[in-house]
Amino acid sequence: MKNVSDLSPLERLALSKALSPTEAREANDLEVLPEGEEREVSFAVRVQGTLSRGKGSERKATNRARTAGAMCALLAASGAVRVHSAERIVRLWREIGSLDKAGFDRFIASLDDDARRAYDLSMTLFDDVIVAGLPTIPSKGMVKLK
């Protein structure tokens, strides 16, 4: 029997793909292993299938993550904090930031026409001025285990 550290790089890649992200999240159950507890396990798993990798591509070197400091500076420098209270902005930011993709899409769809135009313009400018100026980096193709 092998330990994970004894696996070849290809075997480790196959093992990493054996559980989907959803299965891995669902397996992280506090009832199975409550906080602060420790339980021994010893089991073997046979992983059998075919690994394949899709074609790589290039992407812009950003994940569009914005730090709290950068957003607060942007809002303050643009005058948004003078027009709207900082407390209101942060509360709305918390609400929007906690949405998953489907929830975010619903939020954007619910904007009135003026807010939607402002959002679309801001995103277009962000893509044209900031993202377009970033270097591209190679992106690995998706690995699948069948």
Image (spheres, helix red, strand yellow):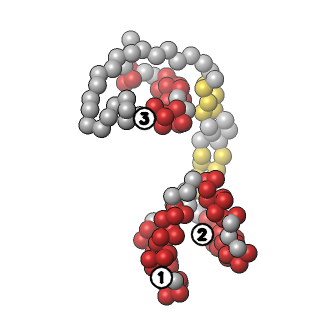
The mark lying in front, picked from 2 and 1, is: 1
Q: CA distance from mark 3 to mark 1?
A: 40 Å
**Neighbourhood count class around disc 1 (C-alpha, 10 Å): few under 14, some 14–19, many 20 upward:** few
| Residue 145: x %, y % from top left | 60, 26
| Element under disc 3 | loop
Is 50 located above or below residue 28 in the figure?
above
Circles 3 and 2 in contact, beta carbons < 8 Å:
no
Q: What residue appears at the point 56 percent right and 16 percent down from the top-left corner?
A: 48
State if disc 1 and disc 3 touch (CB < 8 Å): no
x, y (%) of residue 139?
60, 46
The residue at the point 39 percent across, 23 percent down is: 4
Instruction: For label 3, count other residues whose C-alpha is less than 10 Å away and answer few (under 14), some (14-19) or many (20+).
Output: few
Q: Is residue 3 above or below residue 135?
A: above
Left/right placement of residue 5 relative to residue 49 reads left
| First reached walking from the N terminus: tag 3 or tag 2 | 3
Residue 21 in view (yes/no)? yes
Q: Which mark is residue 73?
A: none
Amino acid marked by disc 3:
Asn
In primary-sequence order, the first of circles 3 and 1 is 3
Q: Position of residue 129 (x, y in %)?
A: 63, 72
The residue at 49%/88% (across/down) is: 82
Q: Which residue is mark 2?
A: 130
**Residue type, label 2:** Ile
The answer to whether 35 appears left or right of 135 in the picture is left
Describe residue 3's horizontal placement relative to residue 18 as left or right.
left
Q: Which residue is mark 3?
A: 28
- Secondary structure under the numbered disc 2 in the rendered image: helix
Residue picked out by circle 1: 85
Q: Secondary structure at mark 1?
A: loop
Q: Quadrant of residue 87?
A: bottom left
Three-letter code, disc 1: Ser
Q: Is residue 121 above or below residue 53?
A: below
